[in-house]
Amino acid sequence: MTSIWVKSIWQFLFMAIAAIFVGMIVNEVKLALIIFIFSYLAWHFYNLARLEIWLHKGKKLTPPVAMGIWGHIFNEIYYLQQRKLKRNKKLLKLLNRFRESTAALPEGVIVTREMGEIEWWNTKAGELLGLKYPQDVNQRLNNLLRNPEVTTYCQSENRDEPVTFPSPLDEQVTLSLKVVPYGKKQNLVVVRDITLFKRVEEMQRDFVANISHELRTPLTVISGYLENLLEDSDLDGDQLEHAFRVMLQQAARMRHLTDDLTILSNVDNKKVEVKTERVDVPQVLASLQEEARILSGNQNHAIVFDIQPDLLLQGDPKQLDSVFTNLLVNAINYTPTGGAIKVRWYQDDSGAHYEVNDTGIGIAPYHVERLTERFYRVDVARSRNTGGSGLGLAIVQHALQRHNAQLRIDSEIGRGSSFICDFPSECILHKQAVIPPALEQVQVDRF
Ligand code: ADP
């Protein structure tokens, strides 16, 4: 028994004795006791009423003032209330923090009951699935999504592997959904946008398929000729020479492919830093002009170079060389005999531009936006004949991106194409600016 109770009992006994004593004085002990007990009961009823009003009707949090056991009860209840209030505040803070953190999650999170009725979702889930508050609260997720795969997944026993399905808002977006049971018959549904991941997966698959396809043809040709050589020992000199020539050609094709793959992986690898060296573009293009003439051979292309002699670039020499060469080699390969090719290197207000114009076969508009994809070729047979790997423009695109430059393609079927590389002003250097004035002075003095 607590001290307050002992104290109350003593108080009660003391007051009862006092009432008996007063009763004895006035010779009305019974009456005095009855009055005392009624007064005591009335005091309790009065305090009970105050307690009830305070708890249910009174908005004030401070307790009524009372003496004895009632004062103690009021205070105890008041402390309990305060503790509860503090705990509620803490819980509210925690809940807000939880909401804030789930709202910041890159994944959509939905809390559902046993039968899939939606209780709560975060902002991302709302965005991904188009959930609307408050209409969709208590709706079954299955009914809202109306996707047979999701329904089968939600009804199955084994839900370890997430289900993938097209977004109800946009067919192009692929979503993954996983149900994680928690608490008392509740589920956490995690929704992710895996469009990019899917695309990368597809690209990887296509990439491997393309490489094996590209290697299969030359390997088949080489092994065919080798089998012939093994089986038929009566081949004459001309036949042997032809066989070796074809095998050499196919080997060169494979080497070209692996070379291009190496360049592409270097250009594509963000971990490999782009060199920022001074690249004397006019000088590079001068040697390219020679190569172009040799490559054009007896096709008699009219190749013209219009080069701004002082215009240099700051960048990666190898990558830039790949850009310049690939575009020019393509122009030669896809321009019929006697056609014209013009290469321009110049600066204007928007930056520096490398432009290759040809009067070749041209490209239909629907092919243009896919040209920079790996292994994309308009005419596969023609590209193979010219020794193309289908990686040239992918290399150009990646190399330009690493220099913050852009590729523009303008083409018309039967009339020719223009491939223009736009380099930003930050990449530009000029010959005068590179040589310090003091040094120039010294050189002048010497003459
Ligand atoms: P490839 O090694 O096949 O030339 P690229 O990536 O360099 O591969 O080019 C992709 C495709 O773009 C080529 O197969 C060709 O169909 C088309 N192409 C590129 N340059 C030109 C051009 N100057 N004229 C016409 N078609 C072109």
Image: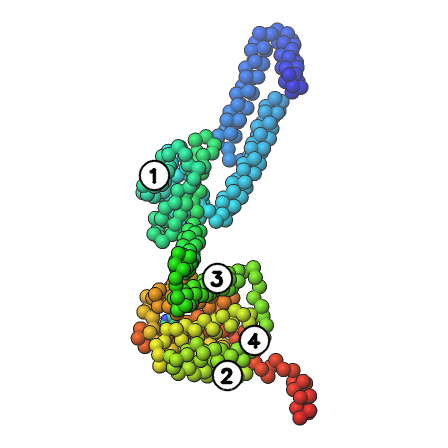
| Residue 149, quarter of picture | top left
Kind of residue at badge 2: Gln
Which one is earlier in the sequence, the residue at label 3 or at label 2? 3
Kind of residue at badge 1: Thr
User: Which residue position is annotated with label 3?
Assistant: 258
User: Which residue position is annotated with label 2?
Assistant: 308
Tell me how far mark 3 sits from mark 2, CA to CA: 34 Å
Which one is earlier in the sequence, the residue at label 4 or at label 1? 1
Per the rendering, the mark at residue 279 is 4
Tell me how far mark 4 sits from mark 1, CA to CA: 60 Å
Tell me how far mark 4 sits from mark 3, CA to CA: 26 Å
Q: Residue at x 67, y 19 (%)?
A: 3
Kind of residue at badge 4: Val
User: Which residue position is annotated with label 1?
Assistant: 151
- x%, y% of residue 13? 64, 12
Q: Residue at x 36, y 34 (%)?
A: 155
Q: Residue at x 36, y 48 (%)?
A: 166
